[in-house]
Amino acid sequence: MSACPAYDCAVVGGGVMGCTTALWLARAGMRVVLLDRGSLCREASGVNAGTLTMQMTRAALIPYAMRGWELWRTTADWLGMDVGTRVLDGLSVAYTEAEVGMLEARASSRRAAGAPVELVDAARARDIEPGLGDGVRLAGFCPVDGFVVAYLTGRAYRGALLAAGATLQEGRAVTGIDPVDGGFALGTADGGRVEARRVVLAGGVWIQEMASWLGVRLPIQCLVNQLVVTERLPPVMRTILGVANGKLSLKQFDNGTVLVGGGWQGIGRGDPRDGGAEIVPENVIGNLQLAVHAVPRLRDARVLRVWLGYEAETADAMPVVGRLPGFDDAWVIGSVHSGYTSGPYIGRLLADAILERELERPLFDPGRLAGR
């Protein structure tokens, strides 16, 4: 390795968390290169629903999500571009006794963590969301849910990173990392080599493979999530709407299209190693049936498109954010449940850690899961 590597930090992975980390490092004066095999924010950060929610965020992550939410609301200030952020009422509804129990427990824990979540009866839920169908027994209400237009985020980050002096290498896949004197040497698919004193692994479901390049076993599970978008419709709903069991997420965009999602187990099939994914038709049908039950006016809506995206999850369903075990200057960030909401804040926290600043909140030590 050369005596003076070209970069102070190489960030591998251009999603929301990788981009945010790179941005704050560059603004602090570091020479930063960000590499991604595709375009910025086009994997999980570009194919998700863009939902900003407290009710689907784990209680332990609520303080991070609240700070992330504020960053999303002010992207024009710190990214230089509005990304279509909308603040909406959020409802999580319960239809069964079991779901009522879930809702009560989750609302209590999230409220204790600082989220403005309250329980409301069916009549109040219908006042908040007139489009609701019958059968609601209880609902969680949060006035600070909303969404971001996910496909705008890459453009916003690209402009901010370039303005901060970062080097962007989109469409350049990293195939390996070797620790060398003074830092790391990154091999790329085009046969090239990038040298940096520090490295940040921000590759989502590919973090496990990236960590293995440095001899660290960091188990990451891949979930394949599905989204359905309808044709443009007259207003049929005005909230971010979900079901307590997690199997439905609904929102209507400004252009009239309705996005239908939900965390069905096995809702899609795919393998991040080859990038392939396919839908499971019966799960698409079940997802849509639940959507129509929740909002009956969706019954005659036509589906325009169905797509899939990868989501990373650890064994304890908590993030991995911090130093890679065994290395002073290798860092990892990812696997954040409902990570879109808290992503910008967690990325900024990691940048502060790398810059040796005092942290507002603790990170999530990857060492608890790692082996060699």
Image (cartoon, helix red, strand yellow):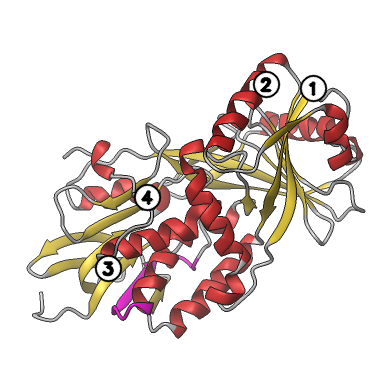
Q: Is residue 314 magenta?
A: no
Q: Amino acid at mark 3?
A: Leu
Q: Mark 3 or 1 closer to N-term?
A: 1
Report crowding for label 3: few under 14, some 14 to 19, many 20 or more residues within 10 A (C-alpha). Answer: few
Mark drawn on residue 206: 4
Q: Is residue 293 left or right of residue 72?
A: right
Q: Which mark is residue 275?
A: none
- Alpha carbon distance from label 3 to label 1: 49 Å
Label 4 or label 2, whichever comes before in sequence order: 2
* First reached walking from the N terminus: tag 3 or tag 2: 2
| Residue found 69% across the figure and 53% down from its top | 146
Image quadrant holding the N terminus, namely bottom left
Residue tagged 1? 137
Query: In the figure, 293 relative to 173: above or below?
Result: above
Q: Report the Cα–Cα distance between label 1 and label 4.
A: 41 Å
Q: Nearer the viewer, residue 83 or 262?
A: 83
Disc number lying in front (3 or 2): 3
Coordinates of residue 42 in the picture (x, y in percent): 53, 61
Relative placement, left or right, of 332 versus 129 is left
For label 3, the residue is 355
- Horizontal relation, residue 331 to residue 27: left or right: left
Marks 2/1 in contact by CB < 8 Å: the verdict is yes
Asked if labels 1 and 3 touch by Cβ distance under 8 angstroms, the answer is: no
On screen, 26 above or below 327? below
Rendered residue at 29%/78% (across/down): 30
Q: CA distance from mark 3 to mark 4?
A: 25 Å
At a point 66% along the width and 62% down the height, the residue shown is 149
How far is disc 3 from disc 2 in space, using C-alphas? 44 Å
